[in-house]
Structures are given as structure tokens and as C-alpha cells.
Amino acid sequence: MTDLKTRILEDIALTGPMPLSRYMNLCLGDPVSGYYMTRDPFGQKGDFTTAPEVSQMFGELIGAWLVSAWQALGSPSRIRVAELGPGRGTLMADCLRCMALEPKLMRGLQIDMVDMSPTLTAAQQKKLSHAPCPVRWHSSLPDSDLPTLLIANEFFDALPVHILVKTQKGIAERHVITSQEGKLGFADLPTKLTISQSQIDATPFGTVFELSPERNDVADNIAAGIDANGGAALLIDYGYLQPKTGATFQALTNHQMVDPLDQPGEADLTALVDFTSLERCFKSRGIHVSGPVSQMDFLLDLGLLERAGQLGADQSHEIQTGLQQAVTRLVSPDEMGTLFKVLAATSFDDPMPGFQKPS
């Protein structure tokens, strides 16, 4: 039994059933035993692989997108680029290689990296130790009066979710409880949280809804910054385009699905992102939204195939094969291509690359 599991059992014994959202927060962010606080989970030897770790092409294309957004803002002399949940720092390092082609942008650029993990922050600091501009690290996104370009790749999926169930007695919320055998289990209990009356009326008893007010709060904070100072946000995550019912909450270890209650703090806990809800947060503040579109359409429109051709020109068969495999992983519908979605929120209405389907 893990130390965190022992403490969760004690917490439930003292205070009663624990909402799933709190359980998720503890498993991922507990200062002593939280999943992201104690390890580097990326890559084949970890629990999952993100797009920046698949190929440098992903980050380079995001860097090109950031340059386009900076130009759409009028090429301001000072600007901030912020990244939420920057992993090992691979994405930002690859972005900077592309952004460095614009000297004016680099002269006034400030990077803010936002991560709660000491382990991953150390990896980012090593990766960006020779960055061509100032880089700062924070546990939460700091306020700034600069126009901001923000990236969040696989960030929102790890924010806590609430699972609600329509029962004959009203709306219940999923909690973590202790069974008679001393094991963790689930129970749907009364809650103050609710859903719209139209959703209640349109669905049968037993219907499950997955909500994340925490995600909406983060999106609203980003929107407020864009509204106040100008800028753009690029959100990339696995999720769905239209509101849906059912629970997507899951746990992953060593690239395999596992029981989320088995070893708290030892598995990644995630849930699919409701992009409609995020879109609503930005539009409520008058922010222009592009997409969401599939990662496949986004990367192909940005020129993924052309970049792969450039990198593979006159290279060995082995390198060319590796590039082909990376392209497949990033854009194939059987891989990351359609599972992942991309949304842009901007203070301007200019059409942005990546949001027009390739012909």
C-alpha cells in the first residue's frame, strides 16, 4: 500500500467520502507522493508519450504558429510566451528554435513556464539552460501587462473532473469511499453540484455527466488576460467537440489502463476535455475562437509533411523511416491525429494557420 493510499483511507475515515475531484487532485499533486511531483512520466520508459516527445517537428510548427500570432498582434516589441504544464521543456525548446528566426521577436521575449512538479521543473531548467531569452518558472500563471502567447499541450486533461449521475432521488456525485474490506471504492452520493434542467429532462435515470469547473476557471483566467492585454492561446489536448454524456476518467501506467483506485499516486489520472465548454469560456469574454480542429488537420495545414521532407532530404533510410513513423504517430486517425483536438483563442480576428483543412 502506498503512503498516499494510507493517508486517503485515513482522510475518508475522519471526514467521510471524498469527491472524485479531490481524489484526483491528491493523486496528481500531493506535495509528497503526487504522481507529477515525484517522477518524469514521459516516453517509452514512462507511462505515456506526448507529441513533443514524438518529434521535434511538432514543437517547430507550434513555434511557427506563435510567430504568426505575434505578427497578427502587430509585432509588438515586448511579448510574453507562457506554457502550462511544460513537461520536460521539449516543446518550448523546439518552439524557440523556430522563433529565433525572428530577431525582433526574440529581443523583447519573456518566457514563463508554469509547472507544479519539482522534478519536471528541473528537467525544463536543464533543457532551457541556454535559452536565447529570459525564462522564469512559476507554480501558477503570473499576471502580466504584456501581450501573451500561451501554449497548453496536454494540460487540461489532468485537471480534476466531477462525475455526476442522474438518479431517481436527484443528481448524485461520484465519491471515493472505503469498503468493509478496507479497500477504496466508488459511491454516488448526494451533491450540491447540478447540471442544466434541459440536460436533466432530456436524459434517462442513470445518465452520467462529467464536469470540470476547474478547467473552466483556468480557461476564464486565460481569457481575462487576453482580453486585458491582447494575445493568443493555443490549447491542444485529447477530447471531444460536442457535449456528451458518460465518464471518460481513467488511469494509465506503463502505457496501459489500470484501476484508478489501486495505487494512488502511482498512475496518471486523466479525462477527455470538453472543448465546447472551453470555447464557451473564451466567447463569453468576446475572445475570438478558431477551431477546435483535429491535430491531424492542424499539423497538416501548418506544413508537417513539408517539414518532414526538409528534415529527411539527403538523409539515411533510417532517418527518413523515423520521420515517416513520427508523422504517422502525430496525424494518423489510428494514433494521435483525430483523438487530439486544437483550439485557438485570440484577441484578433485574423485567420490563423492550422485552422483551414488541407485541400
Image (cartoon, grey):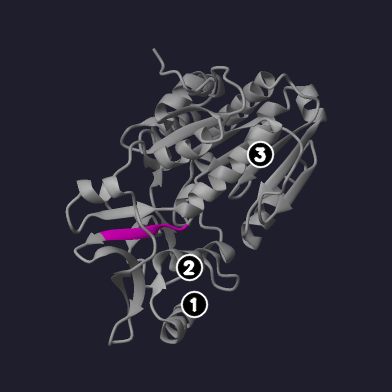
On screen, residue 135 above or below 119: above
Q: Quadrant of residue 226?
A: top right
Please name the residue shown 47% across and 56% down the image: 45
On screen, residue 71 above or below 296: above
Residue farthest along the top direction in this orientation: 359
Q: Magenta span: helix, strand or loop, mainly?
A: strand
Q: Which residue is mark 2?
A: 27
Q: Quadrant of residue 181?
A: bottom left
Magenta-span inclusion, residue 163: yes
Q: Residues within 10 Å of mark 3 (few under 14, many from 20)?
A: some
Sequence-first tag of 1 and 2: 1
Q: Residues within 10 Å of mark 1 (few under 14, many from 20)?
A: some
Q: How far apart are the alpha carbons under marks 3 and 2?
A: 30 Å
Residue 112: where, in percent of width, then height? Answer: 71, 44
Q: Is residue 129 left or right of residue 230?
A: right
Q: Which residue is mark 3?
A: 225
Residue 331: where, in percent of width, then height? Answer: 40, 31
The amino acid on which the numbered mark 3 sits, given as a three-letter code, is: Gly
**Magenta-colored span:** 160-165
Sequence-first tag of 1 and 3: 1
Residue 251 seen in the figure: no
Please say if the residues under marks 1 and 3 sit with CB atoms less than 8 Å apart: no
Please say if the residues under marks 1 and 2 sit with CB atoms less than 8 Å apart: yes
Sequence-first tag of 3 and 2: 2
Q: Which residue is mark 1?
A: 4
Disc 1 on helix, strand or loop? Answer: helix
Q: Residues within 10 Å of mark 2 (few under 14, many from 20)?
A: many
Placement of the N terminus among the 4 image quadrants: bottom left
The amino acid on which the numbered mark 1 sits, given as a three-letter code, is: Leu
Please name the residue shown 39% across and 59% down the image: 162
Q: Is residue 78 left or right of residue 318?
A: right
Disc 2 on helix, strand or loop? Answer: helix
